[in-house]
Amino acid sequence: MEVVMWKLISILCIGLLSFNLLAQDTGLLIKNRADPWVYRVAADSYYFTASVPEFDRIELRHSSSIKGLAQAEAKVIWRKKDQGPMSANIWAPELHRIDGAWYIYFAAGQADQAFHIRTYVLKNSSADPLQGQWQELGPLNTGWDSFNLDATHFEHQGQHYLVWAQQDKNKSYNSALWIAKMRSATELELPATLLTEPTLDWETLGYKVNEGAAVLIKHGKIWLAYSASATDHRYAMGLLTASADADLLKTSSWTKAPKPVFYTNDSLKRFGPGHNSFVLAEDGVTDLMLYHARDYKEIQGNPLQDGNRHTRVRPLYWTDKGELDFAQDKPD
């Protein structure tokens, strides 16, 4: 009888262990890195950058694979100033290759005005962005001076575009998304076009925010993901879509999903997912999404001071009709 009981207990324990493993996300890539950005040069060449918890520097790492980024050396390529512009809140760097040079767009405040956030640009003419010198090109002129951040670049049909988040001083929200064509990596064709404002209920929880844009072009459409609300468990991702042949500078060309497409999932311990980037996997077929999230819900104090937003990676899914599916209820 005792042997039978031990066998039953063993079976139950194994079953519970299997259930727990299935119930957990397995997509953790890099701890304590928020606003992840990955740039694919080739099937065996990926660069990665993100916000560090101290908000005081920009790091860059390289690997021959996505998973390899976790162990890759993080090289500091730039540090914040002691005072004045670019001396506080170094946020959301993104690495882009434009017209034969490397550029990093990032947001920064000032030591005496931490939330005087503006977008700044660095340039490196080396073939390898981990080599050579990074030159400071100063702030990016977006057409008016106000809180702005999260600039991202994409190229479509031979035209370069920039999308970023910025405050409209005449509106009551924190930030909306804007788009403009680019004359160069540091000059926009202005005025910019408004893409989306935080008007939906799920976009205004804690803060009224649209930010963190990322672009994927596939199946004849432009898929533009963005993030909204406060940076706690209420943070979530929305989606804009436009036809690949549309005039992307017309607000009416874009369709906005009425509900979030990726958001907190308690059972998977995925809280406040957002500020993603898209990338093609090594196989040249699978679309991946890197994003940040916490693995717990309750936060003590200001969420921005909680450095446990971790970079995660998961595959994207496509329906038979070619529609993007974030698979909210699937683990990474």
Image (tube, rainbow, N blue to C red):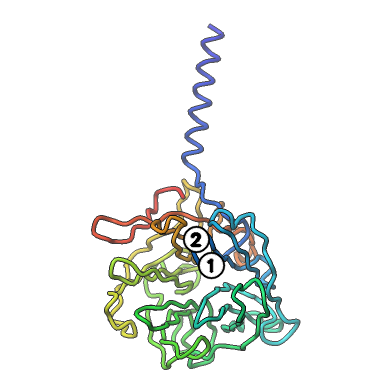
The answer to whether residue 252 is above or below residue 237 is below
Tell me, yes or no, whether the two marked residues, 1 and 2, touch with CB atoms within 8 Å: yes
Q: Which residue is mark 2?
A: 290
In this image, 318 relative to 162: left or right?
A: left
Q: Callout 2: helix, strand or loop?
A: strand
Three-letter residue code for mark 2: Leu
In the image: residue 13, left or right of residue 85:
left
Which residue is at the far front? 127
Q: Based on the displayed image, in which of its 4 quarters is residue 52 positioned?
A: bottom right
Give the residue displayed 62% in from the left and 88% down from the top: 138
Q: Position of residue 164 (x, y in %)?
A: 47, 80
Q: Is residue 163 left or right of residue 89?
A: left
Q: Give percent across and percent down for residue 190.
A: 43, 93
Residue that carries the numbered disc 1 in the rendered image: 37
Q: Looking at the image, which residue sits at the far left? A: 321
- The structure residue drawn at horizontal position 66% and vertical position 80%, both measured from the top left corner, is 134
Total marks in image = 2
The quarter of the picture where residue 82 lies is bottom right
How far from the left and from the top, in percent, is residue 17?
Answer: 52, 32
Q: Amino acid at mark 1?
A: Trp
Any mark on residue 62, and which? Answer: none
* Mark 1 surroundings within 10 Å by alpha-carbon count, few (fewer than 14), some (14 through 19), many (20 or more): many
Image vertical order of residue 216 relative to residue 20, above or below = below
Whichever of callouts 1 and 2 sits on the residue coming sooner in the sequence is 1
3D distance between C-alphas at marks 1 and 2: 7 Å
Q: What x and y, as percent, mark residue 44?
A: 52, 59
Tell me if 73 is positioned left or right of 158 in this view.
right
- Where 291 sits versus 126, above or below? above
Crowding around mark 2 (Cα neighbors within 10 Å: few <14, some 14 to 19, many 20+) is: many
